Image: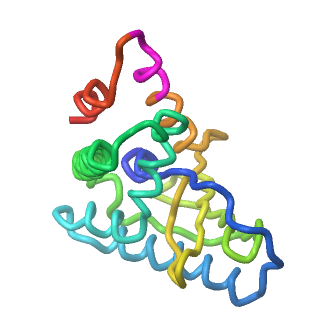
Amino acid sequence: MLRALIISSALLASAPLAFASKDNVESAEALVSTAATDISQSEREQVADAVLSHVDTKAIANFTLGRYGTGLKSTEKARYVRTFEDFLRRQIQANADQFSGVEVEVVDTAARNARDAIVTTQVRNGGDTLKVRWRVIERSGKWSVVDLEVAGIWLAIEQRAQVAAILSRPGANIDDLIAQFG
């Protein structure tokens, strides 16, 4: 149902531990509510822009590289990030019709620390209801989505496994990965 949004999720390394305040929990919930409203009210042509405006695609792309990202030149990493963002945009646009008219209700928020929270929502599309958990983090005063969990699967972690499967092949390199997403 929300496959394109799910694909665009990702997990970022944990933020430094600190006690979460009520304001931070409310900020995390506000981000998810705003993102859901923006996405569901967007015209088909603007759905990808609405999704990606709330997602930290650079963090997601870097996370998906895992240990393979440490040996890359900055130019290679930048090429991959651009390709990954383009891939996400295409996936979202291909599934844009699935976003219209959905209703999203925040049902719970669990603060992992002051800058990291999991926001649980119920997503309704007609008669179907789906539980979606959004991982959101704050960096430099801005909250963004970095992963989604649907049906027990954290999608950024799954994407990272796919990237590792490509790059762990004998002789594989960043160009092979970019070709897969291109």
Please state the horizontal and vertical placement of residue 35, each as a whole percent of the image: 44, 73
Query: Height in image: 9 above or below 153?
Result: below
- Looking at this rendering, what residue extends furthest in the top direction? 170
- Residue 182, by quadrant, is top left
Please state the horizontal and vertical placement of residue 155, each as a whole percent of the image: 53, 42
Q: Nearer the viewer, residue 61 or 154?
A: 61
Please state the horizontal and vertical placement of residue 91, each as a whole percent of the image: 28, 45
Asked if residue 160 lies left or right of residue 171, the reply is right
Q: Write down the region rendered in magenta.
A: 164-170
Tell me, what colour scheme is on the image?
rainbow
- Looking at this rendering, what residue extends furthest in the right direction? 19
Residue at x 57% of width, y 39% of height: 157
Asked if residue 35 lies left or right of residue 81, the reply is right
Question: Is residue 137 inside the magenta stretch?
Answer: no
Question: How many badges with numbers are in the image?
Answer: 0
Q: Nearer the viewer, residue 63 or 144?
A: 63
Residue at x 53% of width, y 72% of height: 32
Query: Height in image: 126 above or below 119?
Result: above
Q: Nearer the viewer, residue 29 or 85?
A: 85
Please state the horizontal and vertical placement of residue 87, each as a whole percent of the image: 26, 44
Question: Is residue 169 inside the magenta stretch?
Answer: yes
- Residue 44, by quadrant, is bottom left
Residue at x 51% of width, y 64% of height: 145
- Looking at this rendering, what residue extends furthest in the bottom direction? 23
Asked if residue 157 lies left or right of residue 89, the reply is right
